[in-house]
Amino acid sequence: MAATITNSIDPRDIGTPDDWIPRHPEMVRLTGKHPFNAEPPLSLLINQGFITPTPLHYVRNHGPVPKLHWDTHRLIVDGLVSKPLNLSMNDIQNFPYKEFPVTLVCAGNRSKEQNMIKQSIGFNWGSGAISCAIWKGVPLNDILKLAGVNLDDCINEPRYVCFTGADKLPNGYYGTNIPLEWSLNDINDVILAYEMNGERLTPDHGYPLRVIIPGFIGDRMVKWLSKITISNKESDSYYHYHDNRVLPPEFDAELATKENIWYNPNYIINFLNINSVITSPAHNEYILLSNLFNDKMYTIKGYAYAGGGNKVIRVEISLDDGKTWILSKLDQPELNHHIVLKRGINPIPKYWCWSFWSLTIPFYSFIRCDEISVRAWDSTQNTQPRNLTWNAMGMMNNCHFRVKINTIAQGSEFRLVFEHPTQPGNLPGGWMVKSEKSSPKLLTFSKNSELSTINSKISTFTINDVAKHNNEKDCWIIINKKIYNCTKFLKKHPGGTSPILINAGTDVTKEFSAIHSTKARELLKVFYIGDLVESQQQKIMTSETHKAKI
Amino acid sequence: MAATITNSIDPRDIGTPDDWIPRHPEMVRLTGKHPFNAEPPLSLLINQGFITPTPLHYVRNHGPVPKLHWDTHRLIVDGLVSKPLNLSMNDIQNFPYKEFPVTLVCAGNRSKEQNMIKQSIGFNWGSGAISCAIWKGVPLNDILKLAGVNLDDCINEPRYVCFTGADKLPNGYYGTNIPLEWSLNDINDVILAYEMNGERLTPDHGYPLRVIIPGFIGDRMVKWLSKITISNKESDSYYHYHDNRVLPPEFDAELATKENIWYNPNYIINFLNINSVITSPAHNEYILLSNLFNDKMYTIKGYAYAGGGNKVIRVEISLDDGKTWILSKLDQPELNHHIVLKRGINPIPKYWCWSFWSLTIPFYSFIRCDEISVRAWDSTQNTQPRNLTWNAMGMMNNCHFRVKINTIAQGSEFRLVFEHPTQPGNLPGGWMVKSEKSSPKLLTFSKNSELSTINSKISTFTINDVAKHNNEKDCWIIINKKIYNCTKFLKKHPGGTSPILINAGTDVTKEFSAIHSTKARELLKVFYIGDLVESQQQKIMTSETHKAKI
C-alpha cells in the first residue's frame, strides 16, 4: 500500500460538483476535469503488486459523484419479490459477509488503440483501466433469499436483477442488470460491497454500497447502489442499452441508432474476454546498445486476465510477430487468497483476479527483434486475436499487445527504445498514435454537409473575451482555437447542461474530443462564431500553464 | 433423415472385431479399417440440416466396440456416495428424462490442418468431426442425488464424477471425469443417454448407455458407460491424462512425456472453443467465368459453434484476408427446440447446438478475391485467431477457416475453383496439403540417429510373400513400400497386439501414418527387412483396388 494517500482537493476538481473528493494527483484523467474518469500510470499501477491501493484504482464515473451518508442511505429491494426490503447500511453490515480479491476491468480497457484506428464513442483508456482490490460485502444471494426470491421464479419467464445507482445523469439514473440465475449461484460470489481494501468505500468507488460481480466487466457493478428490482424485463435505464455493447464493426453510432441495434441482445457484454498486456519494458524504457553483453538478461513482464471465472492457463511471448511463441512463467497470487472465501476447495475454482507473467531472456534477443507480442489463453481454450476489431464503443479490445523496439542515436551512443501502442488520455506517444496522421482530423468537416455554415467573414476573440460568456444565459466555449456560442444548445445537449456549464468560457478541446462522435462534431458547426487570437502576454501565460500541467 | 440406413457389414470391417456393426459406406475412415474413427463428407453432413441422421454422425472409437446387451448391462455408481447403486437399463429408463438436441464435436475437429503444419499425435480429422442429434436420457443429477451425493460434499475437498466405459483398451478401460459441481447443476443438462434420434443408441454411439455433456468436447462423453465413481481424485484412466489435452506449441509428445506435463491441470480441455467453417462453396466447387453477370448472386454458407453453453453472437466473412468483415445472417434452429427441455425461459439460456450462417453476395465479388475467410464471436466476446497454433495432439484448432479461390483454364473456358484447406483422412486436395512438400517426409530418418540400421544390401519381396507372414508368431507389415518384421515388437506395441495383428501380412501405410509419431517412425527402422516389389499382374490389381475405393 505504498501509494500516497491524498486528502487534498485536486485543483482540477475545483469548480466542479466533485470539489469535495480527494483524488490522487497522478491519476491520468481521460475526460478533462469532469466527470472523473481516470486510470493510474501503468508502471505505477504494476509497482503496487497484486493489490491496488484504493487511491490508484481506476475510476469510471458517468457524472457527478452523489453525496451519500452511511446513516441515512437505504437499499430498496422491490419488484417481483414476496418480501420487499428497505435496508439501512447497518442492516447490511450485520449480514454474514464474504471478503476476497477481485480484479475490476473497465470494458473500455485499451480503447485508445481502437480510437487510433477510428474515433469511437469511447474515450482514450490506455492499458491501466484495471485494478485489483479486496472487496467485502454481503452475498447478493442472501439478500435475495431474504426478499423471498428463488430460482424457481425463472421457470416460466425470465428474471433479471436490476441495479440502480444514486447517480442522476442527463438520461436518468445509471442502472443495468444481470440474470437472476447468475446472482443466485453462490459460487459466482456476487456481493454488495461496503468495504474496499479494509476500509469503507471511497466516494469514487460507490460509497456507501456498490455491486461487485466478479468476472464481469466493471461497468455492470453499479456504484452508489440504492435499489435492486427483480423484474421479468431488463433494466429500463438508458445506460443499460446505450453503453457497454460491442457492435459489429460495420456499425458506427449513427448507423446503430438508425437501425435500432442497441437493443439487439447479441451485442450486450457481460464477461470479460481473455486479455494480456506487457508492462516491462515500459513505454520509453531503453537499453544502451553499448551495455549489451552476452551474460545480461532481461525479464519481460505483464498482466493477463480472463472472464467469467475462467483461469488464465498460459501466456506466451513472441519476438518474431507471432511466427513462434515462448511460454512465460505464470504467477497467480489469487490462489493464496482462496481461503478468505471460506468455501473450501472447488474442482472448478473460479478465477476472479489478474495473473502476472514473466519471461527472462538474454538482452541480445532484442537486437534483431522489431517488436514483442504477448497473447494469453484461458481454460476455455480461447486466445486473443492478432488484430484489432474496431467497434463503435471502442470496447473489449483484446488484440495482441505489441511493444515496438526502435533504435535511436542519442549523442554518440545507440539506444533500443521500447514503445507501447498508446499512452492513456491525451498523453503523447505510442506507435499507433503515429498512424493517426492518416485518420480523419478533428473538425475537418465533410464538404457536402448540408449543415455547413462556416462564415466567410471570420470574427476573432481573445481568451479574455470568451471568459466573460460563462453562464447559462450566455455560454461560449473554445475547441481547437475556434469559438462556439452554445447558449441555445445547452438544453439540447444529450449529456445535460452541467458538463458544458462547468467549462463555460474556457478551452474545452480535451473534454470535447475525448467523448464526442463525428456527428457531435458536425452539430457543433452551427454554433461557430469566430476564431481565438492571442496577445503576446496571453501566449506567455498559456505556455506557463502548459508547463505546470506537465 | 434422408441418409440411407444400411444394415450390411462394410467389407473393410470384415476380419476386425467390429465385423458385426453396420456402418454407412460414405463415412470417411481416418484410421484405416480399425478402430473405427470416421466423419461424414462435409457436404453430405450439411445437406442433412440441423439434425444429423445417426448413420452419418461422426464416430470416435479408441478400440473395438464392446458387445453389450440391454437386458444384462448394469450401471454401477460407487465411490464417495452414501448409497451405492447398481442399475439395470430398465431402471434407468424408468426415471424422468430430458430429450433435446446437442451438437457433439470431437476435440480433434480440423486436426488435419494441424498435421499439415507438423504431424501431431492426432489423426486427420477434416471439418466434419461434428454432428447434431436429439439425445434422450436421465439427468445425471437425478442419479447422483439417488446415490446421496450433494454439493456440500465439495466444501472441504474436490469431488469428481469419474466415468468408465466398457471398452477395454491396451492401457485399460477408457475413462475420464468432469467436476461434480458441473454435474449437479440442472441447467447444464448432463444426461446419461439411452436414445439418439428417437431410437436406442447404436453400438458405435455407446449402446446401451453413454454420457452427454453439452458444451464439452465429445471426448468426455464416455460411451458404453458401465461405472460412475465419485472421487476426490481425478479419473485414474490412462486416457484421461494422455488424451484430450492442448499442450503449449513448444512441446511435442516426447518432450511432454520427458517433462511430465501431461498431468498439468492447465492443459486439460473441457469446453469447446468458438469455431466456424465454410461449407458452401464446397471443396472443388466452381463457377464458370463466362456465367458471371451482374445480377447473379451466390450464398456463402457454413456452421459455427461455441462451448460451455455460450451463444454464437455473430459470424463474419472477409473477402480481403481480414481487412474488412461482413456480417452474415445467423440461423439458430436450436431455439425452436428449447421447449423440449421443459425448463422454461432462462435469462442465460444455454446454447448446446451448432448455428448456421449465410451471406448472399454478388457473384462478381469473387473476381478479385483470393480467399474467403470466416470468423465467429461468442457471447463471452471471444473470437477465433487468424493463425493456427500447432499442438502435440492436434486438438481444438479454431483458426479462421479460409477457402482459396483459384482461376483454372478448362478447355476454352475459365473457372473459379474453390479449395478448402484440407480434406479428411487420406483424401487428396486442399491448399494446406500443397505446403506439405516442405514438411518432413514420412520415414526420412535423421542421419545421425544411433538407431540407424538400414541394411546396405536390400532384400525384396512381393505382396504375396508378405501375405504369408500374417500371425502372432510371424508378423510382417508393409509401410510405404518397405517391409517390416514386427513379430518381436508385437507385445511392446503401446497400442496392443490386435491393431497390428488385424493387419498382419498387409500394407498398413494408411493405418500407420494416421496415428504414429515421429518417435514411432524412428522405432520402426530396426524392424526393416526389405523393399516391396510388384509383378506386372500385381500392379494391375493394386490399380483396380484403388479405383474401387475411390
Image: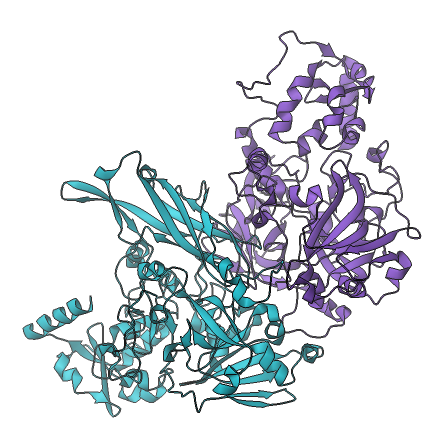
Chain colours: A purple, B cyan
Spot occupied by residue A378 in the image (x, y as percentages of width and height) = 57, 61
Q: Is residue B194 above or below residue A488?
A: below
Q: Is residue B125 above or below residue B373?
A: below
Number of marks:
0
**Viewer-closest of B406 and B3:** B3
Q: Is residue A7 left or right of residue B170?
A: right
- Residue sitting at the far right: A71
Spot occupied by residue B153 in the image (x, y as percentages of width and height) = 68, 80
Spot occupied by residue A144 in the image (x, y as percentages of width and height) = 77, 62
- Residue sitting at the far left: B536
Which quarter of the figure is the N terminus of chain B placed in?
bottom left
Q: Quadrant of residue B497?
A: bottom left
Q: Is residue A481 above or below residue B48?
A: above
Q: Quadrant of residue A394?
A: top right
Q: Quadrant of residue A117?
A: top right
Spot occupied by residue A396 in the image (x, y as percentages of width and height) = 60, 48
The residue located at (51%, 38%) in the rendering is A250
Can I make out residue A60 in this image?
Answer: no
Q: Is residue A92 above or below residue A73?
A: below
The residue located at (33%, 78%) in the rendering is B35
Q: Is residue B485 left or right of residue A372?
A: left
